[in-house]
Image: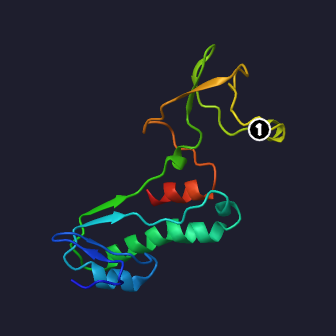
Amino acid sequence: MSSLSDDSIQYEDQRRVVGDVRDPKIWDSVLDGIDIIFHQAAAVGMGQNMYEIAKYVEANSMATARMLEYLARHEHDVGELVVASSMSIYGEGNYKCEQCGPTQPGLRSKKNLAKSLWDPKCPDCGAELHTLPTNEEKALNPAFIYATAKRDQE
């Protein structure tokens, strides 16, 4: 088995390759004998993704699309693809209002943010909310570019 860089680690029956998933040479050189891909690659950074939009869409959505396109067009043994998700695809978490019950408040208002009121309020009565665990059944509601690109990967 060949490795692409000094960062590549080879185990008896698995291999980690460090490289850029957007580079087709990666796929040409690593798929021989591979039946599962654990796709962990992503551009991260919560502030930058709002002004470096193309970078995040290219590195996350398009890179995954190119990998899938490569797999569709070339012969290989890959039968399973595991993609790393992000909690950001759910948007705001789940909350409970003491008066109204479980709720999902959505994005914070510009008015509240201008007043430095960071905690979301109940959308029905305006009361304070208490956090609840967020399960995988929650509707996806990505609120920024990175989250949207991660949702697109899935």
In the image, residue 47 lies at what x, y percent? 67, 58
Quadrant, the N terminus:
bottom left
**Residue topped by disc 1:** 109
Residue type at the position of mark 1 = Ser
Left or right of residue 86, residue 47 in this image: right
Pick whichever, 37 or 47, lies toward us.
47
Is 93 located above or below residue 24 in the figure? above
Q: How is the image coloured?
A: rainbow
Q: Residue furthest front?
A: 6
Pick whichever, 61 or 26, lies toward us.
26
In the image, residue 129 lies at what x, y percent? 63, 24
Q: Residue at x 53, y 48 (%)?
A: 89
Mark 1 nearby-residue class (10 Å; few <14, some 14–19, many ≥20): few
Left or right of residue 78, residue 129 in this image: right
In the image, residue 20 lies at what x, y percent? 45, 77
Quadrant, the C terminus:
bottom left
Left or right of residue 106, residue 5 in this image: left
Q: Residue at x 33, y 74 (%)?
A: 71
Is 8 located above or below residue 152 in the figure? below
